[in-house]
Amino acid sequence: MSVMDLVSYQDALASYDPVMGLEVHVELGTRTKMFCGCATTFGAPPNSQVCPTCLGMPGSLPVVNAVAVESAIRIGLALNCEIAERCRFARKNYFYPDMPKNYQISQYDEPIAFNGYLDVEVDGGTFRVEIERAHMEEDTGKSTHVGGATGRIHGAEHSLLDYNRAGIPLIEIVTKPIEGAGARAPEVARAYVAELRELIRALGVSEARMELGQMRCDANLSLRPLGTTRFGTRSETKNVNSLRSVERAVRFEIQRHATVLGEGGTIVQETRHFHEDDGTTTPGRVKEEAEDYRYFPEPDLVPVAPARAYVEELRGTLPEPPRERRQRLQAEWGASDHEMRSAHNAGAVELIVATVEAGARPDAARKWWMGELARRANEDGVELSELAITPVQVARVATLVAEGSLNDKLARQVIEGVLAGEGDPDTVVEARGLKVVSDEGALGAAVDEAIAANPGVADKIRGGKVAAAGALVGAVMKATRGQADAARVKELILQRLGVSG
C-alpha cells in the first residue's frame, strides 16, 4: 500500500484516536556479553567473538554480567521506575537461525525495573509517557541475506550468520499504552525516543547510535473510533532506526489503519517492516502473543536481588536530567525558548555543545547547525548527526568567520566541501581559494572600477541616496567572486564618494 492509496492524515484523525506502545531496545556498552566473557567490539570479523556459551553449546552455563545489571538499575532509576527487590530471568522460546540456543534469555513476569515515566516536550508543552517496564535480555545474532533484491530472506539465494552480536546485553524499555496524543502521536513518538536516547547517553551506558543498531524502536500502533475506549488491533513496526523514521512510521500506520478500517477491512496483528525510501511499511509475520513464547524461569541463573543500599548508591551516580541540562544550557547560551526547542527537536543540542567546547561561540554554533547544516540534513533525509562533518570542523568554520577570513557565503561553500569529502575546513579553503579578499589595495581598485562603471549610481549616492550603494557593493562582490567583506566594501564606496554612512 503506497502513500497515494491512503486517506489523508487529517481524515484519519477525524474518525479515529491513535493508541501507541513503544518498545526500545538499547545495546549496553559493556566490554563483555551478557552471560559470557566474549568481547563486544563493533565491527570485528564475523564469528570472531563467540564461545560455547553464546553459541548455545550443550553443557555451557551462563553467568550474569554485573555491569549490565548496574546499567539496568541506573536506567530504571533515571526513568523514575521502581527497582525490583528480587527479579529473575526467563527463557523466551522461539526459533530463528540467528538464535543459537533456539531461545532467548530475557525477563518476563519479574523485570528489574517497572512503573516509571518520562516527560517529553512536544509543541512547547510537556507530555508524560508512562513506562511499563525495563528489563534485561540478550541480543540475537545477525543474518545477512545474499542474492535477493530487497536484502530480506524472501528471494535470497543464501544467508550468512554472524554470531558476534549474539549475547550482547540489551535493555528493553516498554511503555504503557500511550493515549491522548491525538494528531500529535507521531511527534510524541519521536520526542520520546529522542529524550530516551539523550538520557541513555547522559548515563554513559550506551552510545545509543541508532544508525549502528545500538538503539532500535518497535512502534506498536492501533486505532479506535473516536469516543470509544476499547483498543483496536495493533501492528508492530520493527527495528526502526532513526528519529525521523519513528515519526514517519507512526504517521504511515495511522493512515494505513484508517484506510483499511474505513474500507470495512480488519487489521491483522502482525510485525511490519519500515522502508526508508518511501516511508511505507510492509507485512512481516503474524505476531505471537506472550503465551506463544512458552516462557519459563531460566534454570541456570539464580534470581537477581539488588540490595536497597546498593540501589540508593547508584541513584547518587545519576547525571543531571537532560531536561534540566537543556534549561541550564539555554540560560548559558542566551537562547530563546523557541531556539532551544528547535535545537532539541532537531537533535542538535549535543552537537552544539560539542561545537562550543571546540571553541565556537554558542550563537555561532547554533547558527550553523540549525541553519545550513539543518537544511542539508533535511534535503538528504538524514539526521544532523549523520552528516559527514564534525563539531570540531563546524567550530573551525565559525572561527574563520569570526576572524574575518570567511564571510557567510564563503563559509557555506567550505561546509559544502567538507560534506563532499574534500577535507577539513582549512584544506577546503586552500583548495578552493575561498579566503576573503582583505587586501585594501585590491578592494580599493575593485571599488574604483565599480564606481567608474556605474556613474549614475555614484551620482545618486553623492546626492544622499545611500541605499543605492547596494548596487555598487553587489558589483564589487561579483568582481571578487563573493570573497570581499561586504561591510568593508560599503565603507570604501562611501569614503570614495565623500558621503557619510
Image (cartoon, grey):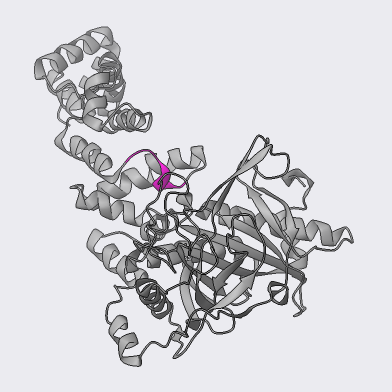
Residue 43 appears left or right of 269: left
Give the quadrant of the C terminus. top left
Locate residue 401, reporting x and y percent.
Answer: 21, 36
The percent coordinates of residue 459 (x first, y second) are: 24, 15
Q: Is residue 407 above or below residue 70?
A: above
Q: Nearer the viewer, residue 372 or 450?
A: 372
Q: Nearer the viewer, residue 332 or 130?
A: 130
Q: Residue at x 23, y 40 (%)?
A: 398
User: The magenta stretch spans which residues?
Assistant: 383-389
Name which quarter of the figure residue 328 lies in: bottom left
- 30 and 257: which is toward the camera: 30
Give how far across and how far down residue 163 sits, in percent. Answer: 51, 53
Q: Is residue 484 left or right of residue 72?
A: left
The residue at the far right in this view is 264
As drawn, the residue found furthest toward the front would be: 59
Q: Is residue 385 magenta?
A: yes
